[in-house]
Amino acid sequence: MKALQIIEAGNIKVTDINKPTPAAGEILLRVRYVGFCGSDLNTFLGKNPMVKMPVVPGHEISATIEQIGQGVPAGFQQGMRVTVNPYTNCGTCASCRNGRVNACEFNQTLGVQRNGSMQEYIALPWQKIIPAADLSQKECALIEPMSVGFHAVSRAQVTDIDTVAVIGCGMIGLGAIVRASLRGARVIALDIDDEKLSLAKRLGAKEVINSKSENVVERVKALTDGLMADVVIEAVGSPITYTTAIDIVGFTGRVVCIGYAKSEVSFQTKYFVQKELDIRGSRNAMPEDFRAVIQYLQNGTCPKDELISAVIKPEEAEETLKQWAENPGKVFRILVEF
């Protein structure tokens, strides 16, 4: 069967691999669409230290059920549209024992620590299959990245009396904007691209700041009568956005970090103490985050077509990734159709 494989940095090829057979407790999926995300781009560029190449990328999955293995409980049907929880959990590490399986110490995400879903068929344990029958196939591929943003809002314990600043209006940041606005919070969106900021406003942001052309600290101060943000969600992963998060959060505020910084970040740690900040990481998503995204998409208010920058065939992957690397700010999600 057809699959995409990143052989080495800058080299992704269509290859032929064996079609899997579902073992007991597994479901065989016919993959329809898989989203390229930032981690896939970093793998292609040779900047993802967690990946051992060659690797089949992809963990943002839209599929239909092809075959159901023995021992799978009722509730799954052949032809059902589904997405996938792409993370593993060991059940015994500290995170798992504390009920936070999304942060499992030994997690292996599809397309990162193990081969991913950019292939025509994939067999997975039934527990990782999430039915989404009421959504379109393309919408199914948007569930996982939005769920990461939804989870960050849960980590921040956002309420309707909070002012929430979201740094970065990519797919994950937009997920955080949607979830925070659904909780009744006032959301301020920050990005360097006006088109993304315009979309952020339609998804629930009350105010937007172009951090490339505006003084972010002064704008946040003006918008909050000097109190600054109750919550800052960092969804970029660069040194400047990490330090900006500390600059614009108010005293006794919460900072939630999603993005991985690719280089060292220097902080004035006195602000951690003076402001008595809560600084939290946010990793992956929980099953309830997937359910919340599905419910949101079922409402029909999400401009899903604007979140999909392109739909390509596997044979177009290498050229598409090269173009994305040259102009990363203009891409939300690229879907690969199988």
Image (spheres, rainbow, N blue to C red):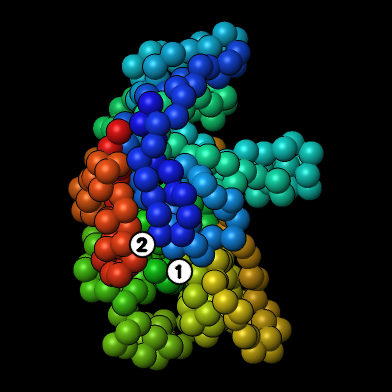
Q: Nearer the viewer, residue 170 or 163?
A: 170
Q: Quadrant of residue 41?
A: bottom left
**Residue 149 visible here:** no
Residue at horizontal 73 percent and vertical 42 percent from the top: 96
What x and y, as percent, mark residue 153?
A: 50, 57
The quadrant of the image that shows the N terminus is top left
Dot 1 falls on a residue whose secondary structure is: loop
Q: Is residue 241 left or right of residue 2?
A: right
Name above or below for residue 235 compared with residue 153. below
Identify the residue under disc 1: 236
Q: Nearer the viewer, residue 106 or 130?
A: 106
Q: Is residue 130 left or right of residue 325?
A: right
Name above or below for residue 123 compared with residue 268. above
Residue at horizontal 60 percent and vertical 13 percent from the top: 24
**Residue 123 visible here:** yes
Type of amino acid at the residue the image marks with label 2: Gly
Q: Is residue 39 left or right of residue 319?
A: right
Q: Residues within 10 Å of mark 1 (few under 14, many from 20)?
A: many
The disc at residue 170 is 2
What x and y, as percent, mark residue 115?
A: 53, 39
What x and y, as percent, mark residue 314?
A: 30, 41
Q: Earlier in the sequence, mark 2 or mark 1?
A: 2
